[in-house]
Image: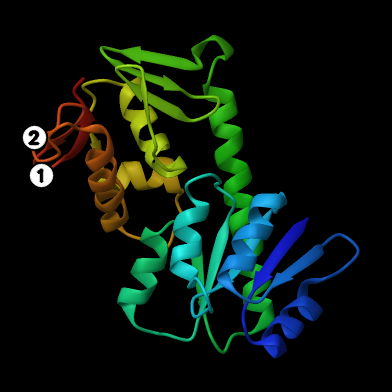
């Protein structure tokens, strides 16, 4: 397993590295947001421990940018206990959060839980997706599922991995209404610590990117009081 630890406090980094590094775990470190982003682009990590308060780029911004090209699991490390900060981290794409000061055993337990969840999600997706079903064409939209790209009128639209997964699920089942809770379960997993607001935020951002008129969506539509569905 390869882990990246990002924190500007070297004492904290040293403590985490000491607590998780062993023969089966390789640990890299970074001390600011720009360094972290560069390392993530250059390496394949199994999981990232990411502090919120960082120089150059804060943890939220790092998380947001990472989600544009990778779905690597991210645990936010934060000294802030305010619920809004937790929600912000999850909505930017974090998988979990740990409040400082923390017990290293708690961090290790959270890491193991996320890695189990990620492996289970990948197994479900692999089992449910046929090899010849890697491209979805609906009207003027094309989804290339292997490389997670979406095109409208042959023009590529830049969306995040999670936004693509929501769009792909809906597009594979046009007209079927999914509740927020069901989308959260299918896309983020049963033990994801965020709530239905996470789904709403991703749908809103997705609409802003793919809809000509986001307030009157054509593709991702709302069934009021129930959830979302693909209209096409």
Check disc 2 and report its element: helix, strand or loop: loop
CA–CA distance in space, label 2 to label 1: 17 Å
The image's mark for residue 196 is: none
- The residue pinned by badge 2 equals 216
- The residue pinned by badge 1 equals 225
Query: Residue at point 10% right, 44% down?
Result: 225
Q: Residue 85, image x and y in percent? A: 36, 75
Q: Residue 169, image x and y in percent? A: 37, 29
Q: Is residue 52 above or below residue 230?
A: below
Q: Is residue 183 above or below residue 34?
A: above
Question: In the depicted view, which residue is nearer to us: 141 or 98?
Answer: 141
N-terminal of the pair, mark 2 or mark 1, is: 2
Residue 8 image-quadrant placement: bottom right
Query: Residue at point 56% right, 46% down?
Result: 70
Question: In the depicted view, which residue is nearer to us: 129 or 38?
Answer: 38
Query: Residue at point 78% right, 55% down?
Result: 1
Residue 39 image-quadrant placement: bottom right
């Amino acid at each position: 397993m390869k882990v990246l630890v990002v924190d500007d406090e070297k004492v904290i980094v040293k403590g985490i590295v000491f607590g998780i590094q062993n023969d089966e775990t390789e640990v890299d470190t970074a001390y600011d947001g720009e360094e972290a982003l560069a390392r993530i682009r250059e390496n394949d990590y199994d999981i990232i421990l990411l502090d919120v308060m960082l120089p150059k780029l804060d943890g939220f911004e790092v998380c947001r940018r990472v989600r544009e090209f990778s779905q690597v699991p991210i645990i936010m490390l934060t000294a802030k206990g305010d619920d809004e900060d937790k929600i912000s981290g999850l909505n930017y794409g974090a998988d979990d959060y740990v409040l400082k000061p923390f017990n290293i055993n708690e961090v290790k337990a959270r890491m193991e839980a996320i890695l189990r969840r990620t492996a289970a999600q990948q197994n479900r997706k692999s089992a449910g997706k046929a090899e010849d079903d890697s491209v979805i064409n609906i009207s003027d939209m094309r989804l290339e599922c292997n490389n997670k790209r979406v095109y409208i009128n042959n023009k590529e639209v830049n969306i995040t991995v999670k936004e693509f997964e929501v769009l792909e699920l809906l597009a594979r089942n046009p007209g079927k209404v999914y509740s927020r809770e069901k989308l959260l379960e299918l896309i983020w997993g049963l033990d994801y610590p965020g709530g239905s607001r996470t789904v709403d935020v991703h749908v809103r951002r997705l609409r802003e990117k793919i809809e000509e008129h986001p307030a009157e969506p054509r593709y991702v539509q709302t069934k009021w009081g129930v959830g979302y569905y693909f209209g096409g």
